[in-house]
Image (cartoon, coloured by chain):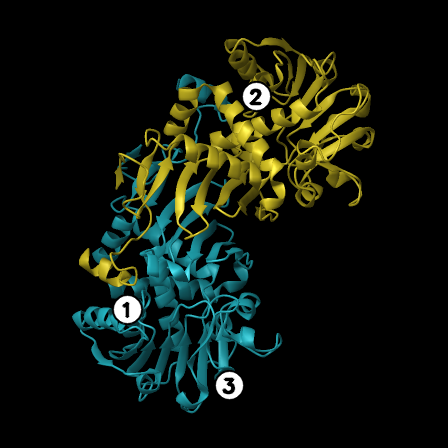
Chain colours: A cyan, B yellow
């Protein structure tokens, strides 16, 4: 039974606020895509700055022939959150999303869920928000042009986030599939971006201060080779995010200063799986707290080896939970059994007969 | 948006069948509690008999001062399932359930969820179904009387399951809180059980062939001491299910043959956390396959050191998924973003504006 609540205050303990895909889209548009991303990035930044307060664990992955299903939990003293997310590169060819997700936020005090939400859209938004937030710390000053290699589902979200947070409005697009670039070009021009279609990766990176790689094949790929990457750029490497899935040639890594979310996870899943287990990397939360250097000079190549970490999803869950407090963008789901006497679960069942 | 489906066939890939608490109760009553449990036990038994086919991992627990929140995933070649469950012993005193749960079943092939369901009731049912199923292998022949120490939320479900699967109709109840026994007595008499209230644990076990211990305090407790347990009984120990939470005196364990679900988990969470890490135990799936002995003689004390394993939840999810195929006992939740072109997630968002 789904009922509209007048308020989220759980007078009925049985009910958990649920944000459907439809309501998530309404919620995003109520704020505007860029404002939503900016607000989300600010919650992510706050959470990165209190990184040691979180209970962190690598994601729990179940691998199969065609993909992976993962659970990504984390918690602070108040809230527990987790995301369910799949990654099935073949899905796209069969008319399904490569990545779908949903998530739950709970109260640590009593273990009750306080939010269930779609996270396919929300993951796209938080991934983009994190990339652009990191870009604000690492991209060269005055960056105006971003190359985007891989024009799939994540592409436009990245562009919107980099405009909102870093002021980048010029995009150079390339994808091995021209239909993907058609789609991205159409969407991005409609959003007022200056878009240049490029014939290959090499030409896409020309004149770009930021290079975003965002391809999805589950195999060792080389989207960028060493000769393509000039001094001073920031590389935002999104696509390499599981064992065996990388995008960059190893030589690029060796010329870059590498920044990561959570080394324990990135060494397994990120571009740096190509490097020795003790290769030096910098943790982004330390950069954001001013405890480690970000970009130091104009010639430096900075690389964000993004894999996506549970704390970013936690931030997104908390952000959405705050935004739906009025009750407008959610339904209430009858998810939790709530007998009058907590010990009388059986009586609740029999009385319902 | 929650809509009633005419069928579960996902013509709309966005929708995931959702079984609310209300629908779970309707579903159970449509079959009858005992028939529901019997059907569930038969799925659990089938899954125990193909135990090696499952991807098994200990549960992922997040402990806090007042409780724990756990994710319990498992998968076979076709389906992936997980349960979210909390355990907060203090909740009861504050009007909340000690344990609440929900779960998700997915397709391994594309990672898409195919069922979201309440599991507070379903966990109570599957825990009872598992206990009684194990009782059918281990309880002495002709057992007629069960002692039930701890008369909380799980008590009546255990009784219903032991009647349905083992034919036990006589119950001897004891709880440190007489109000809990009042509640259980009322519910169980209404179901036609012969109920005897007992003044303490000692008198509860008199004449019982099966002893079910089901208390909830998160501390080393001694619900049963060694002298209370006579030869030939089967002990169904439900309550001890996390580190530091046990119910039985160590000496009882040493006199018993101990049967467990998944040793890697039970050694951390079960009664046998009191014993050496290599103390011999028998895995129930091997008993059910006839590869290990169950009860061998009339004098033997058998002990099911129950902690609850993810495969039982998986069985329960598959069972419910099968039962709701007509679409009567579920709603369809708009949980998954489903753009016309899988790569055009952003276009789906902007067109919704």
Marks 1, 2: nearer the viewer: 2
On the picture, is B109 further left or further right than A189?
right
Q: Residue at x 33, y 44 (%)?
A: A18
Quadrant location, the C terminus of chain A:
top left
Q: How many marks?
A: 3
Do the residues under discs 1 and 2 have CB atoms within 8 angstroms? no
Q: Earlier in the sequence, mark 3 or mark 1?
A: 1
Residue B275 visible? The answer is yes
On the picture, is A118 further left or further right than A84?
left
- Give the x, y percent position of residue A187: 21, 68
Q: Nearer the viewer, residue B75 or B28?
A: B75
Residue at mark 1: chain = A
Marks 3, 1: nearer the viewer: 3
Q: Nearer the viewer, residue B322 or B69?
A: B322
Q: Nearer the viewer, residue A193 or A312?
A: A193
Quadrant location, the N terminus of chain A:
top left
Q: Mark 3 sits on what residue?
A: A251
The span from disc 3 to disc 1 (Cα, nearest Å) is 28 Å
Of all residues, the one furthest to the front in this rendering is B290
Which of the 4 quarters of the picture holds residue B162? Answer: top right
- Give the x, y percent position of residue B15: 31, 44
Marks 2 and 3 on same chain: no
Q: Secondary structure at mark 2?
A: helix
Q: Relative to B73, is B313 above or below?
A: above
Marks 1 and 2 on same chain: no
The span from disc 1 to disc 2 (Cα, nearest Å) is 55 Å
Residue at mark 2: chain = B
The span from disc 2 to disc 3 (Cα, nearest Å) is 63 Å
Q: Mark 2 sits on what residue?
A: B161
């Amino acid at each position: 039974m789904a009922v509209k609540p007048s308020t989220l205050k759980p007078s009925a303990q049985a009910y958990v606020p649920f944000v459907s895909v439809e309501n998530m889209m309404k919620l995003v548009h109520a704020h505007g895509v860029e404002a939503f991303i900016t607000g989300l990035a600010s919650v992510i930044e706050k959470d990165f700055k209190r990184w040691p307060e979180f209970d962190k664990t690598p994601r729990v992955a179940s691998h199969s022939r065609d993909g992976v299903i993962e659970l990504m939990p984390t918690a602070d003293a108040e809230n527990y959150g987790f995301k369910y997310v799949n990654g099935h590169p073949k899905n796209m060819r069969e008319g399904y999303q490569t990545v779908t997700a949903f998530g739950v936020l709970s109260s640590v005090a009593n273990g009750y869920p306080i939010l269930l939400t779609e996270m396919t859209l929300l993951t796209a938004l938080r991934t983009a928000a994190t990339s652009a937030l990191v870009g604000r710390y690492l991209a060269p000053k005055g960056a105006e042009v971003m190359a985007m290699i891989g024009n799939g589902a994540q592409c436009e979200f990245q562009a919107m986030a980099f405009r909102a947070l870093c002021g980048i409005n010029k995009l150079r697009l390339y994808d091995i599939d021209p239909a993907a670039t058609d789609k991205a070009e159409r969407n991005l021009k409609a959003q007022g971006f200056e878009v240049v279609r490029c014939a290959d990766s090499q030409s896409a990176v020309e004149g770009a201060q930021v290079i975003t790689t965002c391809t999805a094949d589950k195999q060792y790929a080389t989207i960028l080779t060493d000769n393509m990457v000039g001094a001073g750029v920031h590389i935002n490497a999104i696509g390499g995010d599981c064992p065996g899935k990388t995008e960059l040639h190893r030589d690029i890594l060796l010329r870059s200063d590498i920044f990561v979310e959570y080394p324990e996870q990135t060494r397994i899943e990120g571009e740096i799986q190509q490097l020795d287990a003790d290769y030096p990397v910098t943790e982004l939360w330390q950069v954001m707290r001013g405890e480690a250097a970000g970009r130091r000079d104009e010639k430096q190549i900075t690389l964000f080896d993004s894999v996506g970490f549970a704390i970013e999803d936690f931030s997104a869950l908390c952000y959405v939970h705050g935004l739906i407090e009025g009750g407008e963008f959610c339904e209430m789901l009858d998810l939790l059994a709530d007998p009058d006497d907590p010990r009388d679960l059986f009586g609740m069942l029999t009385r319902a007969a």
